[in-house]
Image (spheres, helix red, strand yellow):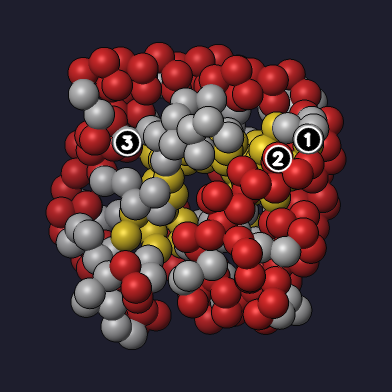
Amino acid sequence: MTSETREAFGRVGIWSSALHGSRANDAGKEAIADAVAELEELGYGTLWIGGSPSPDDAAAVVAATHTVTVATGILSIWDHTAEEVAARIAAIDASARGRFVLGLGVSHGPMVPQYAKPYSAMVAYLDALDAATPPVNSGHRILAALGPKMLRLATGRALGAHPYLVTTEHTAEAREVLGPDALLAPELSVVLDTDLDRARTTARNMLGMYLRLPNYTDNLLRLGFAESDFEGGGSVRLLDALFALGDAEHVKARTREYLDAGADHVALQVLTADEGGAGLPRAEWRQLAGALADEL
């Protein structure tokens, strides 16, 4: 990976599952377009379209922006064939001028009826992207990766890895597996609320779903957490390790911890009590941009 690629991603980005333009009505699409244009102006390096987006979602965000990197975070390999994705990305690239990155993941067994041999399925999918006309080469893709095997694949077959719901310890371990050259861009969920009890409630409302998915719980167990940490939506110890809870200065400090642990880029997902993270928290995005100005 070149220094230009690292610079294109920036140190801090925004991850949001609300950027699904294909799922919105006309008013919703206009709101998304306006929001991503502002995020670009605020200086965020990359906009991550979260929650199993489609290529059409990415196309809409690319069309509404001019310079910011746009990435899927993460497109499920079970939802779209490699050939379909490659054809759609060729159209996106015509207007993206190389600033679109395809984030790919294997999703989760409880969510995908055909889920089987996820590592082999990813290898086959990458092979198909390589063979497509035109291809989607390794310099335009990044992999959702938690364990060492998928992290190693991300090193050889993609720009690097985009781990979700991970600690700083995982970031340090991932950097060792990836080596110095691959991109490492973990997601970090944020609750801007100085009432920590309330902030933890907001975090638990989001975390509960993920604690039912073995890929995440197995990874957390590998990191030293216990089954008891998963009870009640997550122990305080687990929440404090996975989230940035507090004011903007605390989020800045937590972001720095991930960067110091080996991340090249941190994708911030802002959760709010009233929207459960599903809306467009533009006031919070502005507040974070102010606090993180020296990182943007």
Mark 1 and 3 residues: CB-CB less than 8 Å, in contact?
no
| Position above or below: 199 against 155 | above
Give the secondary structure at mark 1. loop
Q: Which of 265 and 110 lies nearest the eye of the viewer?
A: 110
In the picture, measured across the screen, residue 150 lies left or right of residue 33, that is right
Name the residue type under label 2: Arg
Image location of residue 95, percent across then percent down: 29, 27
| Position above or below: 217 against 49 | below
Spatial separation of the CA atoms under disc 2 and disc 1: 5 Å
Q: Which mark is residue 119?
A: none
Mark 2 and 1 residues: CB-CB less than 8 Å, in contact?
yes
Q: Residue under label 2, please give it.
A: 198
Mark 1 or 3: in front is: 1
Name the residue type under label 1: Asp
Closer to the chain start, of discs 3 and 2, is 3
Q: Residue under label 3, please give it.
A: 20
